[in-house]
Amino acid sequence: SENRCNTASNKTRRRTHDEYSLFQTCQGALAVNPRDALMDSPKELTGMVGRYVRFVEAMNYRVGRVAMYLLFVLIGILLYSSASKVFFEPALWTLEMAQFTMVAYFFLGGPYSMQMRSDVRMDLFYGSWSPRKRAWVDSVTIFFLLFYLGAMLYGGIGSTSYSFQYNETNPTAWRPYTWPIKVLMCVALVLMILQATAELCKDIALIKSEEK
Protein backbone atom coordinates (compact mmCIF):
# COMPACT_ATOMS: atom_id res chain seq x y z
CA SER A 1 0.00 0.00 0.00
CA GLU A 2 2.86 2.38 0.88
CA ASN A 3 4.60 1.59 -2.42
CA ARG A 4 1.41 2.36 -4.33
CA CYS A 5 1.12 5.72 -2.55
CA ASN A 6 4.75 6.54 -3.34
CA THR A 7 4.27 5.59 -7.00
CA ALA A 8 1.12 7.72 -7.25
CA SER A 9 2.89 10.60 -5.52
CA ASN A 10 5.85 10.38 -7.93
CA LYS A 11 3.51 10.34 -10.92
CA THR A 12 1.67 13.38 -9.59
CA ARG A 13 4.92 15.30 -9.03
CA ARG A 14 6.20 14.32 -12.49
CA ARG A 15 2.94 15.42 -14.13
CA THR A 16 2.99 18.70 -12.22
CA HIS A 17 6.59 19.29 -13.28
CA ASP A 18 5.75 18.55 -16.93
CA GLU A 19 2.77 20.90 -16.82
CA TYR A 20 4.89 23.65 -15.28
CA SER A 21 7.60 23.15 -17.92
CA LEU A 22 4.98 23.37 -20.66
CA PHE A 23 3.61 26.55 -19.07
CA GLN A 24 7.09 28.10 -18.99
CA THR A 25 7.69 27.11 -22.61
CA CYS A 26 4.40 28.67 -23.75
CA GLN A 27 5.04 31.76 -21.65
CA GLY A 28 8.46 32.17 -23.23
CA ALA A 29 7.05 31.66 -26.71
CA LEU A 30 4.44 34.35 -26.11
CA ALA A 31 7.09 36.76 -24.89
CA VAL A 32 9.06 36.44 -28.13
CA ASN A 33 7.99 38.25 -31.26
CA PRO A 34 7.18 35.42 -33.71
CA ARG A 35 8.59 37.50 -36.55
CA ASP A 36 11.94 37.79 -34.80
CA ALA A 37 11.99 34.11 -33.89
CA LEU A 38 11.06 32.69 -37.28
CA MET A 39 12.96 35.15 -39.41
CA ASP A 40 16.18 34.43 -37.49
CA SER A 41 17.86 32.53 -40.31
CA PRO A 42 20.87 30.24 -39.86
CA LYS A 43 24.29 31.86 -40.21
CA GLU A 44 24.93 29.97 -43.46
CA LEU A 45 22.21 32.03 -45.16
CA THR A 46 24.46 34.75 -46.47
CA GLY A 47 24.92 36.44 -49.81
CA MET A 48 22.20 36.25 -52.43
CA VAL A 49 20.40 33.34 -50.75
CA GLY A 50 20.24 35.13 -47.42
CA ARG A 51 18.95 38.33 -49.01
CA TYR A 52 16.35 36.33 -50.95
CA VAL A 53 15.06 34.59 -47.82
CA ARG A 54 14.91 37.82 -45.82
CA PHE A 55 13.14 39.66 -48.66
CA VAL A 56 10.53 36.92 -49.15
CA GLU A 57 9.84 36.57 -45.44
CA ALA A 58 9.58 40.33 -44.89
CA MET A 59 7.18 40.65 -47.82
CA ASN A 60 4.98 37.73 -46.77
CA TYR A 61 4.98 38.92 -43.18
CA ARG A 62 3.57 42.30 -44.20
CA VAL A 63 1.05 40.79 -46.59
CA GLY A 64 -0.11 38.36 -43.92
CA ARG A 65 -0.49 41.07 -41.29
CA VAL A 66 -2.67 43.10 -43.66
CA ALA A 67 -4.70 40.02 -44.65
CA MET A 68 -5.53 39.43 -40.97
CA TYR A 69 -7.85 42.44 -41.01
CA LEU A 70 -9.89 41.01 -43.87
CA LEU A 71 -11.63 38.97 -41.20
CA PHE A 72 -13.14 42.20 -39.83
CA VAL A 73 -14.16 43.17 -43.36
CA LEU A 74 -15.90 39.80 -43.67
CA ILE A 75 -17.70 40.32 -40.36
CA GLY A 76 -18.84 43.78 -41.48
CA ILE A 77 -20.22 42.44 -44.76
CA LEU A 78 -22.15 39.68 -43.00
CA LEU A 79 -23.52 42.12 -40.41
CA TYR A 80 -24.67 44.46 -43.15
CA SER A 81 -26.23 41.52 -44.98
CA SER A 82 -28.23 40.57 -41.88
CA ALA A 83 -29.27 44.17 -41.20
CA SER A 84 -30.33 44.80 -44.79
CA LYS A 85 -32.64 41.78 -44.70
CA VAL A 86 -34.37 43.11 -41.59
CA PHE A 87 -34.45 46.89 -42.08
CA PHE A 88 -33.87 47.45 -45.82
CA GLU A 89 -34.10 45.58 -49.08
CA PRO A 90 -31.76 42.57 -49.16
CA ALA A 91 -28.46 43.45 -50.86
CA LEU A 92 -27.51 41.40 -53.90
CA TRP A 93 -23.76 41.67 -53.44
CA THR A 94 -23.19 40.63 -49.82
CA LEU A 95 -23.05 36.84 -50.18
CA GLU A 96 -20.55 36.81 -53.05
CA MET A 97 -18.51 39.65 -51.57
CA ALA A 98 -18.24 37.69 -48.34
CA GLN A 99 -17.08 34.66 -50.33
CA PHE A 100 -14.47 36.73 -52.19
CA THR A 101 -13.23 38.24 -48.93
CA MET A 102 -12.93 34.81 -47.33
CA VAL A 103 -10.96 33.52 -50.33
CA ALA A 104 -8.60 36.53 -50.12
CA TYR A 105 -8.18 36.03 -46.37
CA PHE A 106 -7.41 32.33 -46.84
CA PHE A 107 -5.01 32.64 -49.77
CA LEU A 108 -3.09 35.74 -48.68
CA GLY A 109 -2.72 34.26 -45.19
CA GLY A 110 -1.19 31.06 -46.56
CA PRO A 111 2.42 32.30 -46.92
CA TYR A 112 2.25 34.02 -43.52
CA SER A 113 0.91 30.84 -41.92
CA MET A 114 3.72 28.84 -43.52
CA GLN A 115 6.30 31.33 -42.26
CA MET A 116 4.90 31.31 -38.70
CA ARG A 117 4.57 27.48 -38.82
CA SER A 118 0.99 27.88 -37.61
CA ASP A 119 -0.59 25.65 -40.24
CA VAL A 120 -2.27 22.43 -39.15
CA ARG A 121 0.15 19.49 -39.13
CA MET A 122 0.40 16.00 -37.70
CA ASP A 123 3.14 15.96 -35.05
CA LEU A 124 2.81 12.32 -34.01
CA PHE A 125 6.46 11.61 -34.91
CA TYR A 126 7.64 14.97 -36.26
CA GLY A 127 7.53 16.78 -32.91
CA SER A 128 9.96 14.31 -31.24
CA TRP A 129 12.61 14.52 -33.97
CA SER A 130 15.75 16.60 -33.74
CA PRO A 131 15.88 19.92 -35.66
CA ARG A 132 18.30 18.39 -38.18
CA LYS A 133 16.05 15.40 -38.85
CA ARG A 134 13.03 17.67 -39.27
CA ALA A 135 15.03 19.80 -41.70
CA TRP A 136 15.95 16.69 -43.71
CA VAL A 137 12.32 15.56 -43.93
CA ASP A 138 11.07 19.07 -44.72
CA SER A 139 13.66 19.52 -47.46
CA VAL A 140 12.29 16.42 -49.20
CA THR A 141 8.55 16.85 -48.64
CA ILE A 142 8.69 20.51 -49.69
CA PHE A 143 8.96 19.35 -53.30
CA PHE A 144 5.51 17.73 -53.06
CA LEU A 145 4.16 21.08 -51.89
CA LEU A 146 5.95 22.92 -54.70
CA PHE A 147 4.50 20.51 -57.25
CA TYR A 148 1.00 21.02 -55.85
CA LEU A 149 1.35 24.81 -55.79
CA GLY A 150 2.79 24.80 -59.30
CA ALA A 151 -0.15 22.78 -60.60
CA MET A 152 -2.57 25.15 -58.84
CA LEU A 153 -0.82 28.18 -60.33
CA TYR A 154 -0.82 26.67 -63.82
CA GLY A 155 -4.57 26.05 -63.62
CA GLY A 156 -5.15 29.46 -62.06
CA ILE A 157 -3.32 31.29 -64.85
CA GLY A 158 -5.36 29.45 -67.48
CA SER A 159 -8.62 30.22 -65.68
CA THR A 160 -7.66 33.88 -65.20
CA SER A 161 -6.76 34.34 -68.86
CA TYR A 162 -10.14 32.85 -69.80
CA SER A 163 -11.87 35.33 -67.48
CA PHE A 164 -10.06 38.24 -69.12
CA GLN A 165 -10.71 36.99 -72.64
CA TYR A 166 -14.46 36.48 -72.22
CA ASN A 167 -15.21 38.96 -69.41
CA GLU A 168 -16.43 36.06 -67.28
CA THR A 169 -19.00 36.85 -64.61
CA ASN A 170 -20.70 34.80 -61.93
CA PRO A 171 -24.13 33.53 -63.03
CA THR A 172 -25.97 35.35 -60.23
CA ALA A 173 -28.17 38.41 -59.89
CA TRP A 174 -25.19 40.62 -59.01
CA ARG A 175 -23.02 39.12 -61.81
CA PRO A 176 -19.58 40.25 -60.58
CA TYR A 177 -16.50 39.82 -62.75
CA THR A 178 -14.40 36.84 -61.66
CA TRP A 179 -10.98 38.01 -62.85
CA PRO A 180 -10.14 40.17 -59.77
CA ILE A 181 -10.36 37.30 -57.31
CA LYS A 182 -8.59 34.95 -59.72
CA VAL A 183 -5.71 37.40 -60.12
CA LEU A 184 -5.46 37.66 -56.33
CA MET A 185 -5.40 33.87 -56.01
CA CYS A 186 -2.58 33.60 -58.57
CA VAL A 187 -0.56 36.27 -56.75
CA ALA A 188 -1.08 34.45 -53.45
CA LEU A 189 0.07 31.17 -55.01
CA VAL A 190 3.25 32.87 -56.24
CA LEU A 191 3.86 34.17 -52.70
CA MET A 192 3.36 30.67 -51.30
CA ILE A 193 5.84 29.24 -53.81
CA LEU A 194 8.38 31.91 -52.83
CA GLN A 195 7.84 31.15 -49.14
CA ALA A 196 8.20 27.42 -49.77
CA THR A 197 11.55 27.96 -51.53
CA ALA A 198 12.66 30.21 -48.66
CA GLU A 199 11.79 27.41 -46.21
CA LEU A 200 13.84 25.01 -48.34
CA CYS A 201 16.82 27.36 -48.20
CA LYS A 202 16.54 27.57 -44.40
CA ASP A 203 16.31 23.79 -44.07
CA ILE A 204 19.42 23.27 -46.21
CA ALA A 205 21.28 25.90 -44.20
CA LEU A 206 20.27 24.20 -40.95
CA ILE A 207 21.47 20.81 -42.22
CA LYS A 208 24.83 22.30 -43.19
CA SER A 209 25.21 24.07 -39.85
CA GLU A 210 24.49 20.83 -37.94
CA GLU A 211 27.12 18.98 -39.96
CA LYS A 212 29.89 21.34 -38.84
Image (cartoon, rainbow, N blue to C red):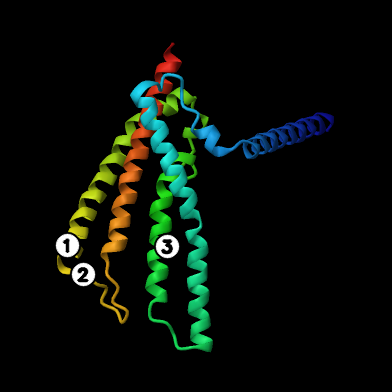
Residue at point 40% right, 45% down? 111
Quadrant of the snapshot with the N terminus: top right
Q: Label 3: state its secondary structure.
A: helix
Q: Quadrant of residue 174?
A: bottom left
Other residues around mark 1 within 10 Å, as few (<14) / some (14–19) / many (≥20): few
Q: Residue under label 1, please give it.
A: 162
Residue at point 18% right, 56% down? 158
> Nearer the N terminus, badge 3 or badge 1?
3
Say whether residue 6 is left or right of residue 80: right
Between circles 3 and 2, the one closer to the viewer is 2
- Residue 82 appearing in the image: yes
Residue 62, given in percent of the width and then of the height, sits at 46, 45
- Residue 121 appearing in the image: no
Q: Quadrant of residue 165?
A: bottom left
Q: Residue under label 2, please give it.
A: 168
Residue 54, given in percent of the width and then of the height, sits at 42, 32
Q: Are marks 2 and 1 in contact (CB under 8 Å)?
A: yes
Q: Are marks 3 and 2 in contact (CB under 8 Å)?
A: no
Q: In the orientation shown, which residue stands out farthest toward the left?
A: 165
Quadrant of the snapshot with the C terminus: top left
In the rendered structure, which amino acid carries the disc numbered 1? Tyr
- Residue 102: mark in rendering: 3
Q: Nearer the viewer, residue 52 or 109?
A: 52
Q: Label 2: state its secondary structure.
A: loop
